[in-house]
Amino acid sequence: MRRYARGMTRPLLLACALLASCSSSARTTSETPAEEEAAPEPAPREAPEDPPEAAEAPFDWGPWATILEAYVTDDGGFRYEALRANEAHRGVLRALVSRIAEADVDGWPQDAQLAFFINAYNVLVIHTVLERWPIESVIRSEGFFDGVEYPVAGVERTLNDLENDVIRDRERFGEPRIHFAVNCASVGCPPLADAPYAAGDLDAMLARQAQAYVRATTRIDRGADRARVSQIFEWFAEDFGGADGVRSFLAAHLPDEDAAFVREASTEIAHFEYDWALNSRP
């Protein structure tokens, strides 16, 4: 999760070439036969090179897509009990946890690595909730984020380590929008996306998640010259470039009229209390 104020995650085509050869034939006429010079035999054509093998996806998130499709709700919740009762899908989740442990991300493109770690965090949060079921709030479950280590790409990490030391690494990724992609199983969290993050559309997915969350949670109070926003922007202000960066980020993701209001230096940026209740749905 997050170190908050509390002390604180294609087919191989083989091409075969046919070598063509041709030979000359002698012609005869009704007149005195005259042997014609044989046409030179053409040189055999070189077989074309095999097309390059399509790059394999570094990690198959298809099983995670199955879980998300079945248990993420339209209102941003998650059907933990339903997943817990489905032994086949529980097995899918356990297998994912094992594959996350054994993955080798060295040499992957940067976006593929970041997508991997975001998905891994979200998988492990769901897994941990189910391992501790029943649970009313992750924040009240001792050691949820910092008491258990999971192997992630060969390195033992707690959920806090995975989020704060890897996903939030500004030198490695420098991507503040990850705060709207990682999900801490709480009502106040940005909801889980309904599909796994993938390198090819990572930027677009992060953009959608960020805008949706900012617009859904920002409360504009023009009479009081105040905009109230999630505590994410308080706890992680440095990831957005400090107070001015937070203001700019908010404005960039709000409708024009609200954006202009937030950009005003006289507008106070306040924060509402985070809701740590479990985002559970039947």
Image (cartoon, grey):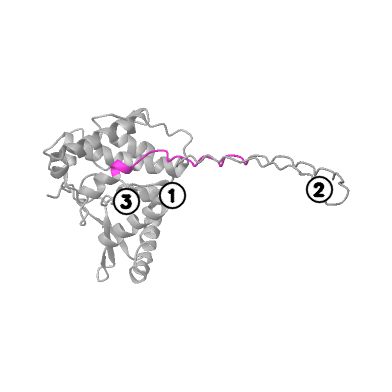
Classified by dominant secondary structure, the portion drawn in magenta counts as loop
Q: Which residues are magenta?
A: 48-64
Give the percent coordinates (x, y) of residue 179: 33, 48
Query: Closer to us: mark 3 or mark 1?
Result: 1
Identify the residue under disc 2: 28
Instruction: Point out which mark residue 180 bears.
Output: 3
Q: Quadrant of the N terminus?
A: top left
Disc 3 and disc 1 in contact, CB within 8 angstroms:
no
Looking at the picture, which amino acid does disc 1 mark?
Gly
**Circle 1 sits in a helix, a strand or a loop, which is it?**
helix
Q: Is residue 9 visible?
A: no
**Circle 2 sits in a helix, a strand or a loop, which is it?**
loop
Give the percent coordinates (x, y) of residue 145: 24, 36
Is residue 251 inside the magenta stretch?
A: no
Query: Closer to us: mark 2 or mark 1?
Result: 2
Of 86 and 163, nearer the camera is 86
How many angstroms separate mark 3 from mark 1 (CA)? Answer: 18 Å
Q: Residues within 10 Å of mark 1 (few under 14, many from 20)?
A: few
Looking at the picture, which amino acid does disc 3 mark?
Phe
Of 169 and 33, nearer the camera is 33
Identify the residue under disc 1: 200
Upstream in the sequence, badge 3 or badge 1?
3
Residue at the (17%, 42%) spot, across then down = 83
Residue at the (39%, 62%) spot, across then down = 252
Disc 2 and disc 3 in contact, CB within 8 angstroms:
no
Upstream in the sequence, badge 2 or badge 1?
2
Residue at the (27%, 58%) spot, across then down = 229
Is residue 54 inside the magenta stretch?
A: yes
**Can you tell which quarter of the image residue 147 is in?**
top left
